[in-house]
Image: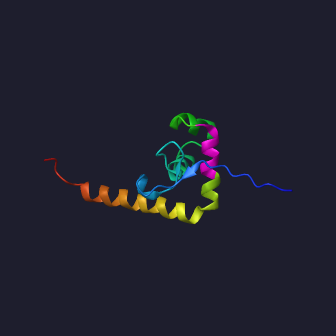
Amino acid sequence: MKTIESINLIYRDPNVRGGRPCLVGTGLRVMDIVMERQHGEADPEKIAAIYEIPVGGVYAALAYYYEHKEEIDKDIQKDDDYIRHVKGETLGRQPS
């Protein structure tokens, strides 16, 4: 008989990080690991060291991302748009 195993390393809580998927035991969002991989460090062991998490957590986050790519990419885009908006509002302002 075949048994399908589950690795429960990702959770969602509406009271943590806006309900976005995070690594269990942390508030670290899956998208944080994805963005690190896309824009910074490609080596999962180095990402684990940066965030002080197990390497398995990095791989779990990446696996979750590829299973939910459209949703996570939208969340990343929303964050990028918000940052650009905030920067646009503050550029050119004189300090108080």
| Residue 1 vs residue 92, the one in the foreground | 1
Q: Is 45 left, or right, of 82 in this rendering?
A: right
> In the rendering, at what x and y percent does residue 81 appear?
39, 62
Q: Main secondary structure of the magenta part?
A: helix
Q: Magenta span covers which residues?
A: 54-62
Q: Residue at 30% of width from left, 57% of height from top?
A: 86
Residue 30 located within the stretch drawn in magenta? no
Q: Residue at 40% of width from left, 54% of height from top?
A: 15
> In the rendering, at what x and y percent does residue 65 appear?
60, 56
**From the viewer's perspective, is residue 78 above or below residue 96?**
below
How is this picture coloured? rainbow
Q: Is residue 5 visible?
A: yes
> In the rendering, at what x and y percent does residue 7 appear?
66, 49
Q: Is residue 43 visible?
A: no
Q: Splitting the image into 4 quarters, where does residue 78 fall?
A: bottom left
Most extreme residue toward the right is 1
| Residue 29 vs residue 39, the one in the foreground | 29
Residue 56 located within the stretch drawn in magenta? yes
